[in-house]
Image (cartoon, rainbow, N blue to C red):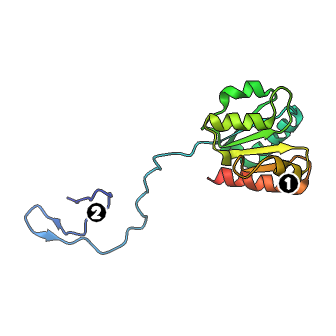
């Protein structure tokens, strides 16, 4: 009879034989290692929420994210910021906010999201304004980054942020 430790591995003690004698196990290494247990917690897809009044811009990012990450992310987009308010909360892995939208601008929505539990380091402001203007409007304590929608280098920086979020 084998004696197993809590880890599931056999003990190093010799086995007892029915007649009371001792039987030594051979010192050979098994050909296949024991299977590791399944992870107890499976990773959920990263939840990315975009609030932008440009439906075409949001749809472009939806396609790009699906092509780049597949099922590792879920993407929600809202053209109306008022409709996005109920979904703001701590379950968001990355929140993308357009600076200028009708009715509710990105600054107000970012403040509301922070009040509702979205960490500031998960909020990214996107706009067609120059990056210097955006940095003047938002400090590093209010959001993770400010991204210009049209500048290619800014888009590359944004992809690096997305890669980092998906890897977490």
Q: Which mark is residue 106?
A: none
Give SS at disc 2.
Answer: loop
Whether residue 53 sits left or right of residue 121 in the image: it is: right
Query: Within the image, what quadrant is residue 72 found in?
Result: top right
Marked residue nearer the N-terminal end (2 or 1) = 2
Q: Is label 2 or label 1 in front?
A: 1
Q: Which mark is residue 10?
A: 2
In the image, residue 57 lies at what x, y percent? 87, 38
Whether residue 6 sits left or right of residue 32 in the image: it is: left
Judge whether 48 appears above or below 157 on screen.
Answer: above
Q: Residue at x 22, y 59 (%)?
A: 3
* Residue placed furthest toward the bottom: 27
Q: Which mark is residue 154?
A: 1
* Residue placed furthest toward the left: 20
Q: Residue at x 79, y 37 (%)?
A: 106
In the image, residue 11 lies at what x, y percent? 25, 65
In the image, residue 126 lies at what x, y percent? 82, 44
Q: Residue at x 45, y 47 (%)?
A: 40
Q: Residues within 10 Å of mark 1 (few under 14, many from 20)?
A: some
Q: Quadrant of the N terminus?
A: bottom left
Residue at mark 2 to residue at mark 1: CA–CA distance: 56 Å
Q: Residue at x 67, y 50 (%)?
A: 166
In the image, residue 36 lies at what x, y percent? 43, 56
Whether residue 38 sits left or right of residue 60 in the image: it is: left
Give SS at disc 1.
Answer: helix
């Amino acid at each position: 009879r084998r004696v197993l430790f809590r880890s599931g591995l056999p003990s190093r003690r010799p086995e007892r034989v029915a007649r009371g004698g001792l039987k030594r196990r051979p010192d050979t290494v098994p050909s296949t290692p024991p299977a590791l247990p399944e992870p107890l917690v499976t990773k959920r897809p990263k939840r990315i929420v975009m609030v932008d009044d440009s439906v075409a811009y949001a749809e472009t990012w939806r396609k790009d994210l699906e092509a780049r990450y597949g099922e590792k992310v879920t993407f929600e987009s809202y053209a109306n910021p008022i409709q996005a308010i109920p979904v703001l909360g701590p379950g968001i892995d990355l929140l993308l906010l357009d600076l200028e939208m009708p009715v509710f601008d990105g600054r107000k929505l970012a403040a509301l999201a922070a009040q509702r539990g979205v960490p500031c380091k998960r909020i990214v402001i996107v706009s067609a304004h120059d990056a210097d203007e955006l940095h003047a409007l938002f400090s590093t304590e209010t959001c993770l980054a400010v991204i210009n929608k049209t500048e290619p280098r800014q888009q590359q920086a944004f992809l690096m942020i997305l890669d980092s979020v998906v890897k977490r």
